[in-house]
Amino acid sequence: MCKYVAVMVDLPVEQVDKPFTYKVPDRLKKDVEIGRRVIVPFGRRKIEGYIIDIVEEVDFDTKDVINIFTSFQFFNQELLDLAKWISEYYQCYLISALKAIVPSGKNKIKTKRVIKLAQSIAQSKEIINEMNGRAYKQIEVLSYLVENPNLLLTSTELAQKVDTTPSTIRALVDKGFILYQVEEVRRNPCSHLNFKTTKALSPTEDQQIAIKEISNSLAEEESSTILLKGVTGSGKTEVYLQAIAKVLEAGKETIVLVPEISLTPQTISRFKGRFGNQVAVLHSQLSTGERFDEWRRIKECNVKIVVGARSAVFAPFNNLGLIIIDEEHESSYKQDDHPKYHAREVAIKRAELSDAVVLLGTATPSLESYHRTQIGEYKLIELPKRVDDRPLPEVEIIDLREELKSGNKTMFSELLQEELKDRLAKGEQSMIFLNRRGFSTFVQCRECGHVMECNDCDVSLTYHANPTILQCHYCDYKEDVPNTCPNCGSIYIKYFGVGTQKVEESLKELYPEATIARMDVDTTRRKGAYQQILSSFKQGEIDILVGTQMIAKGHDFANVTLVGVITADTALNLPDFRAGERTFQLLTQVAGRTGRGDKEGKVIIQSYTPEHYSIQLAQEHDYKSFYQLEIGTREIALYPPFTHLINITMSNEDEDKVIKVSNQLGEILSAEMNKIDGEDIMLLGPVQAPLAKVRGQYRWQLLLKGKDLSQLRLLTSQALTELKDLSTLKSVRVSVDVDPLGM
Ligand code: ADP
Ligand code: ZN
Ligand code: ZN
């Protein structure tokens, strides 16, 4: 009997985005399994791929599989189905989706050339004694190995550990005291961390109810989604932990997703502290090898829980019971490279395929998720109070227009200055938050707060310096930058963009005696810098921490009693229909950093538009009213969750080419829309993308908007096929983003 396999080859190009069939020679028949990596002939080349189907009979000629790698099944049928769904939903190549699932990098199992003592420990000690006084660095190296005989360190690592150069190591090798040895190593990304073991806390009444409801859903053994909406500090993590315990009891596995930025040792230790070695960790800061070893621990059923960032949603469990997504509203769950998937949607699909439960946790649900609770798709569970009945922090809003009028031209209001002084005197800590998300700048009147907006799109206009112009990034409306405010006539109309560095400098001038630190992309580039700033803040070595989004997330610092927001408006005026939602979420999260200990917390939000409902309702911690207002706007303006969007971006170093192709595609899309019953579909653009130029590549975009996503997808793929036939400008890169975020 013959055997054939369908193989997806590892070449992400249009022409090969389909399986190719190969015959399995007898010698390899026993190794055939879905998800195995193979080498197959392809044209004149040999190339790698994955088995995605097994067929007994075909009626055409095929070539033979060259080899099958037997060490791993990289994905099972369930993950294969998930990949197929991703490639269809997000319009990407199946091989790209598969590659998002399998661990990246080659030469998987790594051995390393480590340094070992060439003699017994006792003998080594003698050698050390004999060397006494001389070559003390060599003695240090030997002593280190005597004390840590089981560590597997390369000569470079060893040299680093004892703070010496590789030449010291070489000298010892030459003397024959140590030797190189090749060993297989299992890297453990948490080896440097210590975990305090914790027991289940006795749950509060609300937590109790939540845990009960989640258990009920788990017991049903069919897929469902629960939204756990709990205010900051309400003890969501304890609910997760106790839910995981239930899953363990049932002999099943759990995936916990947290935003990349929250994946701190503090977060990891909360899970490791409760479940110890049953926990694996997966995130992008791990080296390829560390990630692969954690993947193997999961694959080999050595762990039951994975805590990780976005891509951990693909952890290769076979008996999944629960997927938890903490801070489900976070935009980092959306991958910005192909495949541009959203981990929440993938999790829900995966749960469906494996009859698991999805638990979404947040203080500020995304509009999409909360909407789904309202239409009965998700179950809603609430934790309305902080643990121990700690009050939510008092939030005060400062009108910066008034500050200007009373002559304060600094970026700190009188009140913020006073409160900072007060905290310094009391030895309490403060956080100053500056939103610098995105790249766009907007134009605002400092006297009346008026922001220049597009009349048609309900988003702010983006300031361009060269040539000076205001532009709408949805519909391409353009106007000149006004010299005076169209609302009040003031000349204090200017474009915005203050940096964290400026804030830090000004604070140092105001409070020379204080210890001030800054946390943003610049200060955290070095590996470990982020952790270092956080831990010295936690230990009280920093009085005031200035930062971007990075300081807003999940941290639990008991001694922080003041949070200041420099200008709430910067998030509000991004050219994005989600700007109001982002602002509400950010302000709520930032405010949530304070008052978490025994002392009460205070939040000061500065704004030029304090009357905006996102700011007002964040002040009152009133998510529901915010939701009501925002969802109404979305419905009228036909934005998600009432519609779907597909964003198509064209890019090339030659802007004329990009514009030409964009126009071509725009015309094709319009024509297609006329053919089908496309009146529910809207086409916006082509326009310059908000990120108009990246690494020398000019970018233009087209935006499709409509109620029926499958219709939008079909339209897109048809139009792109047509474009390929027409286009002589093949070098222009076309990228499709389904359900885009942060546009
Ligand atoms: P959230 O994630 O909702 O912001 P956390 O999970 O960080 O809240 O919990 C806030 C604090 O309350 C943490 O220090 C946590 O240890 C504590 N906590 C949570 N549940 C309980 C409980 N049942 N009893 C006592 N303390 C609790
Ligand atoms: Zn004005
Ligand atoms: Zn517009």
Image (tube, rainbow, N blue to C red):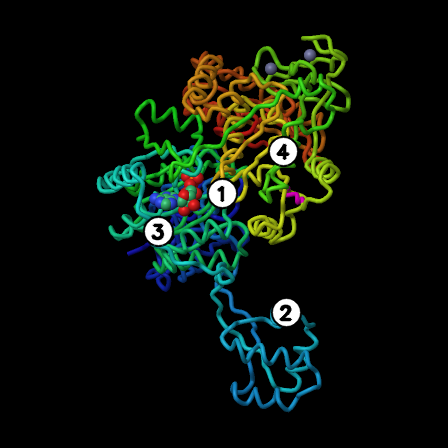
- Is 586 drawn above or below residue 443 in the view shown? below
Identify the element where label 3 is drawn.
loop
Kind of residue at badge 2: Thr
CA gap, disc 4 to disc 1?
36 Å
Q: Are marks 1 and 3 in contact (CB under 8 Å)?
A: no
- Between tags 4 and 1, which lies in front? 4
Name the residue rendered at 55%, 29% in the picture. 742
Pair 3/2: label in front: 2
In three-dimensional space, the C-alpha distance between marks 4 and 2, rounded to whole angstroms, equals 41 Å
Q: Quickly name the residue at label 3.
A: 317
Per the rendered image, the range of residues in magenta is: 516-520
Left or right of 139, for residue 215: left
Q: Disc 4 or 1, which lies upstream in sequence?
A: 1
Q: Which mark is residue 434?
A: 4
Sequence-earlier tag: 1 or 2: 1
Q: Earlier in the sequence, mark 4 or mark 2?
A: 2
Please identify, in this view, whether the residue under mark 1 or under mark 3 is nearer the observer: 3
- How far apart marks 3 and 4 lie (CA) works out to 40 Å
Q: Which quarter is ligand 2 in?
A: top right
> Is 456 in front, or is 165?
165
- Determine whether 154 is above or below 60 in the image: below
Residue under label 1: 96
Q: What residue is pinned by disc 2? A: 156
